[in-house]
């Protein structure tokens, strides 16, 4: 059974079909890319996967369970986590607090323990802080744990957002344009980080990205969307040379040049 199994999902906004009969599957530990021109429907697919939108038709099964139509917090509880194209950190909290808050899905203390400040509450708080600091060390942010997230440089905010997503201990991590705004050196480091995350955290990763060097270097399978429909799917080399993909990105003349 695949970890993720999407079968012909579609969604319409008024008279516009944003995504039409999109299907894909992922196994545990896969790294898959979802690419296409602006407006192709990539982020809409992410929004259906994470409960922001409900598909008008089709099914989404994750780890053997149907998740289409669940609320975003319920889907996070099923161990799917995501980052966003536009960074959505809690910018007036510290770096450490941004990560700690994601552990709310795993806390076990009762409300009474929290209110009465029982020993179990403090033990859990200490464990959350320990695990949060471990994640920050992985992303080389432990030295900035007390800084406000808003004061971090752009590249470090991106890394913090990924660290926060990993704090929910996902089985599937959705990365929406993680290389946006990064220079070539930062993008190369991100590629190495994505491969390391897959190995170290034993998770599957679905990636939306416009940087083709990053996509081609880390993804084992790539799906190409155009106007909400899949126009190509396969290994990087196949996608690189597909005339439909070239046309979608560069226009019909380039595809037949």
Image (cartoon, rainbow, N blue to C red):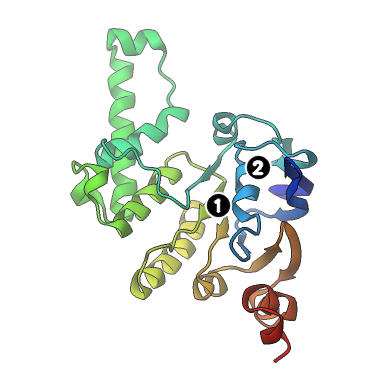
Furthest residue in direction bottom, as rendered:
257
Which label was assigned to residue 48?
A: 2
Q: Residues within 10 Å of mark 1 (few under 14, many from 20)?
A: some
Q: Secondary structure at mark 1?
A: loop
CA gap between label 2 and label 1 equals: 20 Å
Q: Secondary structure at mark 2?
A: helix
The x, y position of residue 17, in whole percent, is 75, 49
Quadrant placement of the C terminus: bottom right
Give the vertical position of 2 relative to 34 (above or below): above
Which label was assigned to residue 160?
A: none
Q: Residues within 10 Å of mark 2 (few under 14, many from 20)?
A: many
Using residue 145 as the reference point, say whether residue 183 is left or right of it. right
- In the image, 46 versus 142, the foreground residue is 46
The x, y position of residue 159, in whole percent, is 36, 54
The x, y position of residue 63, in whole percent, is 69, 41
- In the image, 96 versus 34, the foreground residue is 34
Give the vertical position of 250 relative to 52 (above or below): below
Q: Which residue is mark 1?
A: 203
Give the vertical position of 182 relative to 80 (above or below): below
Q: Earlier in the sequence, mark 2 or mark 1?
A: 2
Instruction: Answer with the quarter of the image where residue 89 lies.
Output: top left
Using residue 185 as the reference point, say whether residue 70 is left or right of it. right
Tell me, yes or no, whether the two marked residues, 2 and 1, touch with CB atoms within 8 Å.
no
Q: Residue at x 30, y 26 (%)?
A: 125
In this rendering, the count of numbered labels is 2
The x, y position of residue 111, in whole percent, is 40, 11
Q: Residue at x 32, y 59 (%)?
A: 155
Q: Residue at x 69, y 42 (%)?
A: 62
Q: Residue at x 47, y 49 (%)?
A: 84
Mark in the foreground, 2 or 1:
2
């Amino acid at each position: 059974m695949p970890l993720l199994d999407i079968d012909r999902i579609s969604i319409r906004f008024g008279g516009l079909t944003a995504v039409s009969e999109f299907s894909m599957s992922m196994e545990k530990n896969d790294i898959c890319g979802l690419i296409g021109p602006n407006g192709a429907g990539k982020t809409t697919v992410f929004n259906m996967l994470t409960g922001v939108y409900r598909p008008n038709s089709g099914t989404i099964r994750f780890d053997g369970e149907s998740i289409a139509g669940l609320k975003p917090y319920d889907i996070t509880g099923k161990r799917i986590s995501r980052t966003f194209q536009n960074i959505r950190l809690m910018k007036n909290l510290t770096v450490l607090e941004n990560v700690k808050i994601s552990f709310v899905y795993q806390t076990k203390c009762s409300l009474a323990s929290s209110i009465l400040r029982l020993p179990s509450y403090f033990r859990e708080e200490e464990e959350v802080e320990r695990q949060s600091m471990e994640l920050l060390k992985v992303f080389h942010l432990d030295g900035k744990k007390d800084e406000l997230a808003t004061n971090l440089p752009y590249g470090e905010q991106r890394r913090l957002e990924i660290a926060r997503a990993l704090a929910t201990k996902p089985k599937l991590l959705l990365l929406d344009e993680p290389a946006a705004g990064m220079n070539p050196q930062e993008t190369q480091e991100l590629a190495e980080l994505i491969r390391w995350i897959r190995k170290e955290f034993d998770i599957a990763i679905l990636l939306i990205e416009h940087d083709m060097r990053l996509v081609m270097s880390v993804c084992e399978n790539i799906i190409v969307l155009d106007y909400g429909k899949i126009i190509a799917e396969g290994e990087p080399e196949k996608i690189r040379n597909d005339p439909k993909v070239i046309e979608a990105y560069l226009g019909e003349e380039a595809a037949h040049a």
